[in-house]
């Protein structure tokens, strides 16, 4: 292998190791990083994308690409594409971008959740019609969940002589809240197990 190619591969490996080491640092520490500036900015961009802040993620990645060495820029652009697709809730683009990075693409369930989130809570760049549609869909979803909770309470109370509409709706609300809390707890445990498996 030519010395220059070996040097480039060693530099790329060093950059990847730097990203892994920097991932444990806080946002403030990453902002003040000077030795691995581009890696620190890329991590900040990825974190902003996880918060669905597309504008800030784009800004971080632009600064990361500007601070990077020429041989690192292609990989950073691919990371930026994947992160921005996540931040802007573009499920199809996210899958393609993650595959270009050479990583395992999101599961069908994760992509479905991202599409649903894009419909309910569209990104800031979406137009007014998309935002109004999101508000209407959220209202419809709340009504449907309340109706399901009310139906469950009515079915359970039938053997005991039934229950009034107002108490049934209130109890149905509690049933829905409990179900959502359980689903969130299960999802958090699965996510933590997946992170532990990767780590």
Image (cartoon, helix red, strand yellow):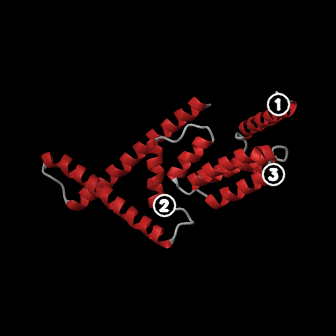
Name the residue nearer the viewer: 41 or 78: 78
- Point out the frontmost of discs 1 and 3: 1
Q: Secondary structure at mark 2?
A: loop
Picture coordinates of residue 79, whole percent (x, y): 66, 47
* Label 2 Cα crowd, 10 Å radius (few <14 / some 14-19 / many 20+): many
Q: Secondary structure at mark 1?
A: helix
**Residue at the outermost top position:** 1
- Point out the frontmost of discs 3 and 2: 3
Q: Estimate the spatial distance between the alpha carbons at disc 1 and disc 3, rounded to whole Å.
A: 22 Å
Q: Which mark is residue 134?
A: none
Residue 189 lies, with reference to residue 96, above or below; the image says above
Q: Residue at x 39, y 48 (%)?
A: 180
Image quadrant in which the C terminus is located: top right
Picture coordinates of residue 178, whole percent (x, y): 37, 47
Picture coordinates of residue 57, whole percent (x, y): 66, 56
Q: Report the side of 120 relative to 101 (left or right).
A: left
Q: Estimate the spatial distance between the alpha carbons at disc 3 and disc 2, rounded to whole Å.
A: 33 Å
Q: Which mark is residue 121?
A: 2
Q: Residue at x 44, y 43 (%)?
A: 108
Q: Secondary structure at mark 3?
A: helix
Residue 68 lies, with reference to residue 167, above or below; the image says above
Residue bearing mark 1? 6
Q: Report the side of 153 relative to 133 (left or right).
A: left
Picture coordinates of residue 128, whole percent (x, y): 49, 72
Contact between labelled residues 1 and 2, with CB atoms less than 8 Å apart? no
* Label 1 Cα crowd, 10 Å radius (few <14 / some 14-19 / many 20+): few
**Residue at the outermost right position:** 3
Q: Which mark is residue 67?
A: 3
Q: Estimate the spatial distance between the alpha carbons at disc 2 and disc 1, rounded to whole Å.
A: 47 Å
């Amino acid at each position: 292998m030519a010395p220059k190619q070996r040097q480039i591969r060693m530099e790329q490996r060093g950059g990847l190791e730097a990203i892994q080491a920097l991932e444990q640092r806080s946002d403030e520490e990453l902002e003040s990083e000077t030795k691995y500036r581009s890696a620190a900015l890329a991590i900040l961009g990825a974190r902003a994308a996880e918060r669905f802040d597309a504008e800030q993620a784009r800004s971080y990645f632009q600064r990361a690409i500007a601070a990077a060495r020429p041989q690192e820029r292609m990989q950073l652009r691919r990371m930026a594409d994947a992160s921005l697709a996540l931040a802007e809730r573009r499920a199809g683009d996210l899958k393609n971008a993650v595959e270009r990075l050479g990583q395992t693409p999101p599961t069908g369930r994760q992509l479905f959740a991202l599409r649903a989130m894009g419909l309910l809570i569209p990104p800031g760049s979406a137009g007014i019609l998309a935002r109004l549609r999101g508000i209407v869909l959220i209202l419809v979803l709340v009504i449907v969940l309340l109706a399901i909770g009310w139906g469950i309470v009515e079915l359970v109370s039938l053997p005991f002589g039934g229950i009034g509409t107002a108490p049934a709706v209130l109890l149905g609300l509690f049933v829905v809240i409990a179900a959502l809390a359980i689903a969130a707890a299960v999802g958090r445990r699965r996510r933590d197990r997946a992170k532990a498996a990767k780590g």
